[in-house]
Amino acid sequence: MKKSMIAGAILALGLAAPAVAAPVQWKAADGGNDHWYEVVWNVGQSIAWTSANAAATSSTLNGMSGYLATVTSAAEQLFLNAVNAAFTASSPFHGGTYTTAWLGATDRDSEGNWVWQNGESFTYSNWYAEGWGWPVEQPNGWIFQNYLAGWETGDKWGDRANNGGLQKYVVEYDAPPVSNVPVPASLPLAAAGFGIFGLIARRRRKAA
Ligand SMILES: [Ca+2]
Ligand SMILES: [Ca+2]
């Protein structure tokens, strides 16, 4: 526990650089969306979905905003399979064709109601669903597994706990950045407003 907290602190400070594959574009000329994708490996350390999500949303690429990747069609899944396989092949530490990586969906707010964090509609899914015995059908974690793990079995998805042991995540970048939901400009003002209200309330209490 202590060790992982220290590792987390080091990562937060950016002292340990994760391994990042060169971003790859899914070109419109190839039937894609012109978005860029980047596999990030947290070298030998598991990374929580929430940490991966925060890292992805603070990433930029040539002025484009990043987010944990969304997979919204079979074609996009196939493209990402190739990206993940290329990354896996480039690393001697990874076995198999693919390795599991976080994707940008969660059902933490409403069990079974999976949503992409960037607001795209969750109409396509690729859950592992042919389970007779082991591995079992996914998602299977009920309220204990609320985060989307890509390539859980082959290229199929599974649900995992926030600290589900994954070491990789995929960042997607829009070109141009359109699908990220921006932080409303009024939010800092609102926060400042609440601060003022808090002051007034304290003064009133003091006066009373
Ligand atoms: Ca769940
Ligand atoms: Ca699961």
Image (spheres, grey):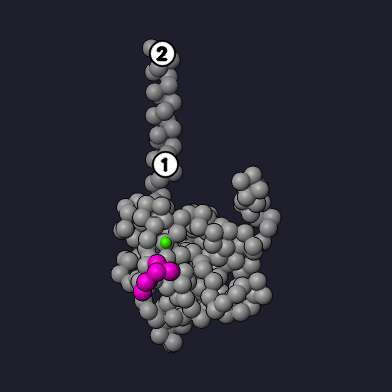
Q: Is residue 43 magenta?
A: no
Residue 136: horizontal and vertical position, in percent?
40, 67
Q: Residues within 10 Å of mark 1 (few under 14, many from 20)?
A: few
Does the image show residue 14?
Answer: yes
Depicted 196 relative to depicted 153: above or below? above
Q: Residues within 10 Å of mark 2 (few under 14, many from 20)?
A: few
User: Considering depth in this image, is 190 or 169 the residue closer to the camera?
Assistant: 169
Q: Which residue is mark 2?
A: 207
Classify mark 2: helix, strand or loop: helix
Labelled disc at residue 189: 1
> Which span of residues is magenta-colored?
130-136
Occupied quadrant, residue 46:
bottom right
User: Would you say 72 lies left or right of 79 here?
Assistant: left
Depicted 182 relative to depicted 200: above or below? below
Amino acid bearing label 2:
Ala
Does the image show residue 115?
Answer: no
The structure residue drawn at horizontal position 41% and vertical position 13%, both measured from the top left corner, is: 207
User: Between marks 2 and 1, how big is the CA–CA gap?
Assistant: 27 Å
Residue 201: horizontal and vertical position, in percent?
39, 23
Counting the numbered discs, the total is 2
Ligand 1 contact, mark 1 (Cβ < 8 Å) = no
